[in-house]
Image (spheres, rainbow, N blue to C red):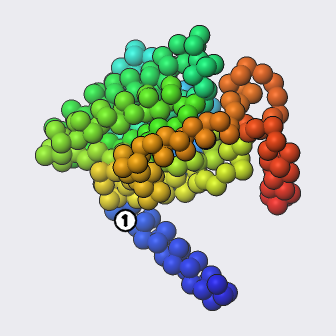
Amino acid sequence: MGEADTVEEEVQAVGRSRDLEADLRRVVADSTVVVTGASSGIGEATARRLGAAGASTVLVARSREPLGALQQEIEGAGGRACSHPADLSDPAAVAKLVESIRQCHGDVDVLVNNAGHSIRRSIALSYNRFHDFERTIDVNYLGPVRLVLGLLPGMRARRRGHVLNVSSLGVLFGAPRFSAYLASKAAFESFLRCIAPEVRGDGVAVTNIYMPLVHTPMVEATRVYRLLPGLTADEAAERICRAVVERPRRVAPALGLMGHLLADAAPAPFDGLLRLTYRWSRDSSAARGEDSDEMEAPAFAQGLLRRLERLGGRRER
């Protein structure tokens, strides 16, 4: 590819970004948008974009200080934002959150369910950790369901609204070591797919977004992920904002949809691939309850992965 081709691609990318910004402003200006998990990562980047587009952005997360800092940043750039610290795993806190949103902002136009709790741990290490499954269900399923049940009636009454779910690509075909996380994410996805035809006639859209690997603080415990290709938080936020504009039923990478089809069409080879993935990976030191800098890979691959990590670190500098 020549230099002229590269420049042309960059110009086209800038044009697409400007088009999205204009479309997003047209859709969300003067609207009330709730973003959960807004204190860092995907949620923070999404809230920042929505605030810049003129939305009245309701910031929700457990951590009060990062929310306050983001609110000041959005307001300093001329946007509108309001912080509502809340723990979505606490039923009373969610009920209080819904009431405070109603009192402060009235009805909600868009709800971005982004908050999540990820656990990567093999089932062999989970026999005595039922609380892992309780925690993920509370944060990734029951809390978001409570929030939807609290905000959906207002959307239906006004015949306008949009509920978005930031899900995981793994929900489409499963993945070893993610039983607690993906089961809870799949539960909320199924809930939304069930209610979608019930509310579509009332002007309420439902979108499930199946995210690939995104390099955020949530995945830092698994060191090998740092070497894998993935999206930045800003790139993930762009996908969410495009979904806010286009209101599709689902957003998924083509590779993920192909994997989903392959799992159904050729289950034996696909299961073999998953077994190989499991055998050629390890639980993280955090999942094992250890303090170690080992990569989550077989011993023979440890040296190569460390060299790749050091090479990547030098390139960043």
**Residue farthest toward the left in the current orientation of the protein:** 201
**Corner quadrant of residue 217:** top right
Identify whether 29 is placed above or below 298.
below
**Residue with the mark numbered 1:** 23
Q: In this rendering, would 107 be left or right of 11?
A: left
Residue located 35% across and 37% down the image: 189
Give the image location of residue 197, x and y in percent. 18, 42
In which quadrant of the rendered image does the N terminus lie?
bottom right
**Corner quadrant of residue 317:** bottom right
Count residues near mark 1 (Cα–Cα under 10 Å), then give few for <14, some for 14-19, many for 20+: some
**Corner quadrant of residue 281:** top right
Q: How many marks?
A: 1
Given residues 59 and 90, the one toward you in this image is 90
Identify whether 40 is placed above or below 27.
above
Asked whether the viewer can see residue 109, the reply is no
Give the image location of residue 265, x and y in percent. 36, 49
Residue located 28% across and 28% down the image: 149
Give the image location of residue 283, x and y in percent. 68, 30
Give the image location of residue 188, x and y in percent. 36, 32
Identify whether 191 is placed above or below 159.
above
